[in-house]
Structures are given as C-alpha cells and as structure tokens.
Image: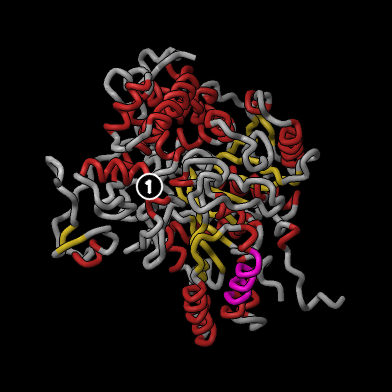
Amino acid sequence: MNFTSLSAPEIQNGLKQGDFSAAEVAQASIDHIARADEQLHSYLEFTPEAALEAAKAVDAALAAGTFDELGPLAGVPVAFKDNMNMEGTHTTCSSHMLENYVSPYTATCVERVLQAGALPLGKLNMDEFAFGSSTETSYFGPTLNPWDLERVPGGSSGGSAAAVAAGLATVTLGSDTGGSIRQPASFCGVVGVKPTYGVVSRYGVVAFGSSLDQVGPFARTVEDAALALNALVAGGKDRMDCTSQSINTDFTANLGDGVEGMRIGIVPSFMEAEGLDAEVKERIEEAAQKLKDAGAEIIEVELPNAQAAMSAYYVLGPCEAFSNLARFDSVRYGYCVEGCKDLAEQYELSRAGGFGLEARRRIMLGSYLLSSGVYDKYYYPAQQVRTLITQDYTYAYHKVDCILAPVSPRTAFKFGEINDPTSMYLSDMFTISINIAGNGGMSVPVGLGAESGLPIGAQLISPAFRDENMFRVAAELERCYGAAPVAPAFAQVDPAKAGE
Amino acid sequence: MTEHVTEKDVRNIAAYVRIGMTDEEVAAMTVDLNNIIDSLKPITEYDLEGVEPTFHPIGGMVNVVRSDNERASFTQEVALENAPKQEDGSFLIPAILGGGE
C-alpha cells in the first residue's frame, strides 16, 4: 500500500475499513522520510516515536469503535514549521540563536492538530526567523524543491511545502507574514492557506511581525487543507492570544457547491504588472476562463493602493521584527558567547553570532525606521497606507466574493539566482497586501508553466473572515486541474501494483 | 542612491540593538540599508492628508483584563531549562556595570 500519496479522508476510510492500521501509516511515513529526506532536507527534527505513540491511540480508538469521536485529522501524518513550539522538541526557527532551544510548552496550533488525532512526524526547515523567500537563509542549510532539486522550494515555510509535495507528510503547518505559506505552496505545487488574521491562534509560534503573522496549513488537496483549518479553529478563541477569534465555520461545507453565480475578481494592475512572467500570467488567465466556464462571473476590480503594499510591508515587517527579536538576550535562552567581560559584551557578541545576515539586516532596519524623526517619515505613513489598502479590499468586496490573482510573479528560481535583498523582496509582490489588510489568501495549483515545466499556483483572496469563499473557488479549480500530485521524483511505487 | 544612513549611523544602530559588528560588516550593512531604504521611497510620496492609520488588522480591540486567579505555569526548574548559565535557581550573567576584571 502506498500511503504517502493518500489524502486525509482516504487514510481515514482505509483505517475504518480495516485495510491498514494507523501504526502502518505512521511507519510508512517514517520509512519514506528516512529514505527521501536526506536528499530534500525538509525536516530539521524527526519525531518517529511521537508519531507511533499517536498512532497507537488512533488504533485503540479503532478497536474500541470510537474512531469517529477523534478529530478531523485522525490518523493523518503531519509536521510543523520549526517556529512552532512542541513540548520536548527543538524549536530553532532555523537559527543558530535557537539551535539548542528545547520547547518547554506546546503552541496552540500544534496542540489542536494533535488533539485532532494527527500523527506528528517532526519539525520543518524554514528561512531563519521566517526572513526570506527560499529557505536559503536557514542556518542548517536550504531545503530543495522536490520538483527540481536545483531550485528553491520558496519560503519562508519552504520545508512545510516541500514535505507535502514529496509525500513526507499529508498536512503541514506553516506561517505567513508576507507570503510565506502561499509562495512556497506555489513553488512546490501544493495547496497553502493563509487564513484571515485572527482565525488561528499565534500562541507559541515565534513571532516575526505580530500584526501580520498568521498560521495556516499545507496539503495536496483542498479538502485536506479545509480539514486542517477545521482542526485549528476547533476549541474556539484561544485565551492565550487576545487577537484570536471564535470561528464556527466548517471549511469543508461548501467545497462541493461549485462556483455557479459566484462573482470572482481579477485585478488588471496585477495581471499587467512588470515582472509577471508570461507563463504565470497564462495560467492565471486560463484559471479565470475555467471558473467562468463553471458558471462564475469574472469581474475586474482595482486595488489602486496595492502597489504601495510592498514598501508599507518593508517598513512594518522590520519594525515589528526588530521589536520581537529584542527578546533574544543570551540570558534566558538562546546562543550565548561565554567569557565576556560584562553583560553588554555578552549581548553584542551573542546576538552577532546568533543571528544570520538577513535577521541582522531587518533588526537594524526596524530600529532605524522607528527612530525619532524617521518614524514620521516611514512608519506612520505605512500605517496610513494600510488603511487605504484595507479600504481598497473592502470596496472590491462590494463587487466580488473572492479575488483571483497570481501568487508569485514566477516559478521556483535556482539556488543563488537572486542575491540582493531588494530583488528577493519582489517575490512577495502579489501576496503582501493581504497580510497588510489582514484578510485570507491561499495558493492552489493550476498546472505547470509552459516554459519552465514547474508548478504554478493561483492565489484566491477572500474578504476578512469569509475564508470559506476562497475554499469554494479552490475546490472548483481542483476539479479542473486535478489534485496536486506528489512530485514525480518522490512518488512511491505502490508495492501492490508494482508487478502489474 | 541617496545616503540615508552613514557608517557612523550604522555603528550607532548596532550599539543600540546590541549586535557587535566588524568594520567590513558595517560597510556592507550601510550599503544594504541604503538600498533598502531607497526602495521604501513610495511610502514617503503618498498624499495621506487626513488618512487615519491602521495599527492592527483587528480593529476595536480593548485591553483584556482577567480575574487574578492562581493557575498552573512553568516551574522555576522548567523556566531555567534553556538558560545558557544558571546558579542557585537564577539566571547567571556577567557583571552589568564596570567590567569584570
């Protein structure tokens, strides 16, 4: 039986019918990771014992006839971005600073996925502290793209996307501050969801930009992503995160509804943007046509201030990161240079040695932007621009139920291809306005590029707290294009069919 | 490229954010920061007269107050588990003032 390409409901049906046990599912994933991840480097920490332990509980429930009382991810292999605390595991944020940090507690998002019956396989590589779009800034070395090992998987949640694309987990969690779930999902050809800010608790997730960060799932099918989001919102508002909201939506409810009568927006200035590759544009236009053929109305909407989102983000992100990264003091936890003459020297040498170049850059930029005199020139206007961008979306959603856009201007690039920070920042040009406004966005695969032969994702953008709208459209696109396959080089041959 | 920050400014920022830097690092960081700050120019050119700022995507938040009840938290031992250095149940640090000669 080839478990690694199964969807969550396929696993659950197999378990209920007695075709296989949860222990077998866990073991198959463990074996697949042991074989394939040496090449891919998506996992930073591997927790086979925890997966087998969780599988035991699922098998016990099956034996007792209480399987249906388990949550939406019962028996499903999962893994977590390494900025999420899971008690007893390392949580490194791919940084030298936290190389030896062991979580003393569990993040709410991780807790809820475990509560839902999932089998935890480990922690996944990322750009250091989520600063990057390629995983190249990871202190532990990059993750490779399962579709082409010479290329980046995207980032910052590159390990989370690559693991799902290679069948090394069925569902993973990532976090998205400016595109860090959607861009790697697009590069690796999987579904990646950044819910509306406040849908998922951020408690226990190492903060980058506290007003921008949101946790969300990766999966190969839209339904698996919806089930994961159901697990993440189960239990309601998290009292440990005052920004988390009580969400009562079943994200699987409208997946079969089709798009007949839905109004879907296209943003002309996005489609004509300088830097958008022809092969990406072609796929997004084709997706729009398919949605139209399925009965949706395609309407042009403008987001006149969206082009300011980029500079607003590169003001707000570093400012919030500067503030959040002040906590790494080499005293309570984290990298510490010993033998310093005083505390100031210990701070300076430990933070210099603990943070990578991009982290140091953003800390210093944030500090500069918040300094007296400079604050009024950049930070305050960025927050005013945020109002305009939010108003743009509000206005657009008077006319449409969901917006269709590119995720990334291009397909996955090669390692080392983009060297200067400002060019790297452009990979987020279509994703960051959503973090600025706070509404939901997701990437869903729409085939391969005609030139590159690499996966391309379409971005669906929902009004705030109407994330079910984008899921409904995503399910239609999945019917048109088929569910995301495991990347060909990592697809396992089913032993049962091997002899055929 | 406009010179938004000089090497001297970068040294001051580095001191403020407690990140030690070599001369070469200061020179490279000065170039990087000036490039990045240049790219932020559009934000300074908008007509934002009368536009209220949005500091957070969730509006209308009020301060959260909870009743002052005892509840489980980390033990001292757990809180110290990740400390690079500890002594007698406390975090151990070098001298704060005056160096340790």
Of all residues shown, which one is farthest toward the right? A500
What secondary structure characterizes most of the magenta part? helix
The stretch drawn in magenta includes residue A33: yes
Q: Is residue A493 magenta?
A: no
Which residue sits at x=29%, y=39%?
Answer: B61
* Nearer-the-camera pick, A192 or B79: B79
**A415 and B48: which is toward the camera:** A415
Q: Amino acid at mark 1?
A: Gly
Seen at 33% across and 22% down, the residue is B9
Q: Is residue A73 above or below residue A480?
A: below
* B78 displayed left or right of A142: left
Tell me residue A460's x, y (percent): 60, 41
In the image, taking residue A290 as reference, residue A200 lies left or right, namely left
Residue A168: image location, x then y, percent: 61, 64
State the extent of the magenta-drawn residues as a range.
Answer: A26-36
Counting from the top left corner in percent of width and height, residue A195 is at 49, 47
Asked if one can make out residue A215 in the rendered structure from this viewpoint, the answer is yes
Q: Position of residue A175 (x, y in %)?
A: 48, 48
Tell me which corner region of the image, top left, top right, bottom left or bottom right, holds residue A411.
Answer: top right
Looking at this rendering, what residue extends furthest in the bottom direction?
A63
A118 lies above or below A129: below
Q: Chain letter of disc 1? A: A
Decide which of B70, A343 is in the foreground and name it: A343
Q: Which residue is mark 1?
A: A354
Residue depicted at 27% across the width and 52% down the height:
A338
Q: Which secondary structure, mark 1?
A: helix
Q: Residue at x 25, y 66 (%)?
A: B78
Q: Residues within 10 Å of mark 1 (few under 14, many from 20)?
A: many
